[in-house]
Image (cartoon, grey):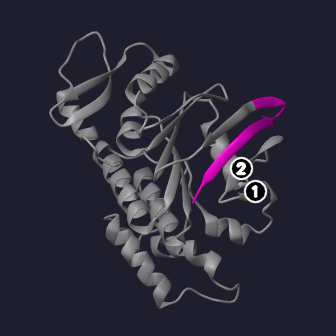
């Protein structure tokens, strides 16, 4: 399924948030990076129909999403894992099964098939022990995983994730993104996500879009011959010249070189040769 942003310009409170943003997504995962306030979340909310750009269009398999009136149809095309995951008072199992709502008639209740899908999603993410707990009693990272489980049972062609790594510990960040990629590959689906950690973008995304003050700084594919050069130049323009690649027997990783010239070779596990492509 193709996803393309064409000349998106977004105004909020008389300010330009996004200006003439154009790019297409490729591969299983497209990562959007940029400093705080660069417009990453606004871009994703424009895709979801929560914001309405003043100019431009977003096409999903040729469908102009700006002209799509049916929220049910949009939910069948796009699922969403927000940055701030809240759902007070709702048991995890019931929260996750809501992902099947776009496929049920308004009088229908979830049945055996829907709850089996929930069990499978929770098991794949390793959080089946949470199913009888309520959302407000979970940690932020656990709630994030429950949102991901709901997005998976929704079975939309595109998953939209806003900073999926936030609130997760070091190990669960990589577990979540590894299993996300496995799911997308297995079922022929795609994702676009905003992410802060360049090491995660490099390790799991096929295409990286760099945003700076609401405009495209660069759009880079892992298949580009000069990917490493362009990626590092873009990251340094965004975050500073201390960013660099470090390489070891297992592959490469992005690191921040501080005053101490430490050995970061163990971090290269984050990017084994050919991993995730």
> Which residue is outermost to the top?
259
User: In the rendered image, which quarter is residue 218 located in?
Assistant: top right
From this view, report whether residue 121 is shown above or below residue 274.
Answer: below
User: Mark 1–mark 2 contact, CB under 8 Å?
Assistant: yes
Q: Nearer the viewer, residue 170 or 222?
A: 222
Point out residue 202 in the picture as x, y percentages from the top left corner. Answer: 38, 37
**Picture quarter with the N terminus:** bottom right
- Report the label total: 2
Q: Nearer the viewer, residue 114 or 127?
A: 114
Point out residue 101 in the picture as x, y percentages from the top left corner. Answer: 62, 77
Q: Which residues are magenta?
A: 1-16
Relative placement, left or right, of 180 versus 45 is left
Point out residue 192 in the picture as x, y percentages from the top left corner. Answer: 53, 49
Q: CA distance from mark 1 to mark 2?
A: 6 Å
Asked whether residue 162 appears in the rendered view, the answer is no
Task: Check if residue 273 falls in the magenta segment.
Answer: no
Q: Residue at left 49%, top 23%? A: 234
User: In the rendered image, which quarter is residue 109 located in?
Assistant: bottom right
Q: Nearer the viewer, residue 76 or 231?
A: 231
Label 2: how many Cα within 10 Å (few below 14, some 14–19, many 20+):
many
> Which residue is outermost to the left?
249
Instruction: Check disc 2 and report its element: helix, strand or loop.
Output: strand
Relative placement, left or right, of 245 versus 9 is left
Q: Which residue is mark 1?
A: 64
Q: Residue at left 46%, top 48%? A: 164
Relative placement, left or right, of 164 versus 125 is right
Q: Which residue is mark 2?
A: 58
């Amino acid at each position: 399924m193709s996803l393309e942003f064409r000349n998106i310009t977004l105004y909020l409170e008389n300010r330009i948030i996004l200006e003439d943003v154009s790019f297409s997504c490729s591969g299983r995962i497209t990562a959007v990076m940029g400093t705080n306030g660069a417009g990453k979340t606004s871009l994703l909310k424009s895709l979801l129909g929560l914001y309405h750009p003043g100019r431009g269009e977003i096409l999903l398999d040729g469908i102009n999403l700006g002209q799509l009136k049916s929220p049910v149809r949009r939910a069948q095309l796009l699922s969403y894992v927000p940055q701030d995951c809240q759902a007070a008072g709702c048991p995890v199992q019931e929260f996750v099964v809501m992902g099947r709502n776009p496929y049920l008639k308004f009088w229908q209740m979830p049945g055996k098939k829907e709850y089996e899908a929930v069990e499978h999603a929770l098991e794949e993410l390793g959080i089946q022990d949470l199913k009888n707990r309520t959302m407000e009693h979970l940690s932020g990272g656990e709630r994030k995983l429950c949102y991901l489980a709901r997005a998976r049972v929704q079975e939309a062609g595109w998953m939209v994730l806003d900073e999926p790594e936030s609130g997760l510990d070091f190990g669960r960040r990589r577990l979540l993104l590894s299993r996300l990629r496995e799911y997308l590959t297995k079922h022929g689906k795609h994702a676009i996500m905003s992410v802060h950690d360049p090491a995660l973008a490099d390790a799991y995304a096929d295409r990286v879009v760099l945003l700076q003050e609401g405009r495209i700084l660069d759009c880079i594919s892992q298949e580009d011959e000069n990917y490493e050069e362009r990626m590092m130049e873009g990251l340094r323009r965004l975050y500073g010249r201390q960013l660099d690649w470090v390489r070891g027997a297992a592959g490469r990783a992005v690191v921040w070189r501080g005053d101490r010239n430490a050995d970061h070779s163990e971090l290269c596990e984050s990017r084994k040769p050919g991993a995730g492509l």
